[in-house]
Image (spheres, grey):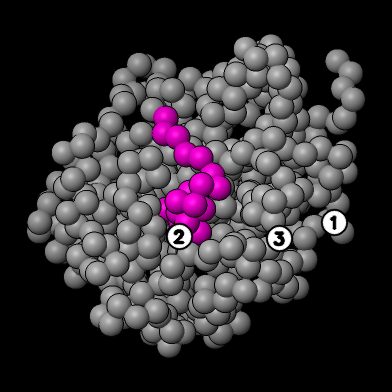
Amino acid sequence: MKHPIPTRIYITQEEMPEYWYDLRAEMKEKPDPILHPGTLQPVMAADMEPVFCKESVKQELDSTTRLVPIPEGILDFYRAYRPSALIRAFYLEKELGTPAEIYYKFEGINTSGSHKLNSAGPQAFYAKEEGLECLSTETGAGQWGTAMAMACGFFGLGLTVYMVKVSSEQKPYRKAVMETYGAKVIPSPSNTTEAGQKILKENPDTGGSLGCAISEAVETAVKTSKCRYVLGSVLDHVLLHQSVIGMEARTALDKYGIKPDIIIGCAGGGSNFGGLIAPFMGEKIAEKSSTRFIAVEPASCPSFTRGRYVYDFGDTAKMTPLMRMQTLGNGFIPSSSHAGGLRYHGMSPVLSKLYHDGYLEARSETQTGIFDAAVRFMKSEGILPAPESSHAIKAAIDEALECKRSGEKKVILFCLSGTGYFDLSAYMSYNAKTLTDEIPTDEELEQGFASIPDIPQNR
């Protein structure tokens, strides 16, 4: 089968971006500031530095620097697995019979199996540079915990990971990889923290949530000497690091003069989607393109499509600053039948603002629907996708089939953010037809909304 362009479009290591791209610098209206939970005033660096690494705080609070230089130590870390391939999905296109061109940026070629390493490396590097000895974090489906364990192993740091309880039960091999790298993995909620003990007292049978795990990880960080907390999504400095995805994708597409009409990514907290769209969204904000951007989330945790755009805490114990974001409420706990990640109650403030201002679209998909799409993709393209990434695949297939109906040729780009080899229990459930679609009712969502703080900005 002869193709006009290569199936895989690579850029060289010399063409890798030497800068991260901060989309906030391009936004006509910036996201609302993060607020101190006590004073309700914008947070200062001194408020955040007891919890986060100093350089991460600096990046979080700087919304005006468009291009942020990537330190050589981080570039050296990136070169172990970057640049990643941009792949033309010729075989999926043929199976669908669509005139659309489908491309995907494949971020799964590393042991963690996902894009999360793009921010784990920088955060571990900054911790080492600061003279810290250990870090704490949370993980849902396990990609972030695995990536952080890899980065801490590389830079010689200790790591404690609070893994959402139901995920730790579903994905024991993720835990095994983290522990092999030297991390301590604790199912959350646990009895090792005051936050965990309180949550268990109120709901002893809970399967946990990322909000619960964040509370435990933050508490551990502030109570441990030479330790800080690291986060794998939602916050602005994480989206900044993930912009390497979009920067590489644009360089690869530019080699062949290709302009995407539609860009798609799965969205839980927003890291891979925000990283993919960053340079392309900058062009749209500058009115230099008409690209459509589609965020795809699970119907069981629909913070974009059914959430509220208000200030909320980032964790269940209400220890974190307040962020204005699309949220289901910090007390929201997704169904234990939810097989993948994308289980955070809120969404990146940057993406939430863009959604609120009409720059991007959002849709939700059921578990059975995304696994149908995953199987269709793997049979064509030969890659077993993560359940999270399969949300983007589902939307890409739907858009390609719409092109088939209309006869219109469009260029579709999506992020294949990770592989599904640690998710085989979910695939087994799908094959056995025991995978269920749990969609929260309006009444169940109201229980989560009830946990949103009553502050003037939310009235």
Q: Quadrant of residue 21?
A: bottom right
User: Please, what secondary structure does the residue beneath circle 3 have?
Assistant: helix
Instruction: Determine the residue positioned at 43% across, 84% down.
Output: 44
Tell me whether circle 2 and circle 3 mark residues in contact (CB < 8 Å): no
Q: CA distance from mark 2 to mark 3?
A: 26 Å
User: Please, what secondary structure does the residue beneath circle 2 have?
Assistant: helix
Q: Position of residue 46 (x, y in %)?
A: 43, 88
Name the amino acid type tagged 1: Glu
Query: Reading the chain from its start, which is encountered first: label 2 or label 1?
Result: 1
Q: Position of residue 421 (x, y in %)?
A: 53, 35
Task: Verify whether residue 363 appears in magenta.
Answer: yes
Q: CA distance from mark 2 to mark 1?
A: 30 Å
Mark 3, other Cα within 10 Å: few <14 / some 14–19 / many ≥20: some
Q: Which residue is mark 3?
A: 78
Query: Reading the chain from its start, which is encountered first: label 3 or label 1?
Result: 1
Highlighted magenta segment, given as a residue range: 347-365
Mark 1, other Cα within 10 Å: few <14 / some 14–19 / many ≥20: few
Name the amino acid type tagged 2: Pro
Name the side, left or right, on which 114 lies relative to 218: right
Q: Which residue is mark 2?
A: 349
Instruction: Determine the residue positioned at 32% across, 63% down.
Output: 311
Q: Which residue is mark 1?
A: 15
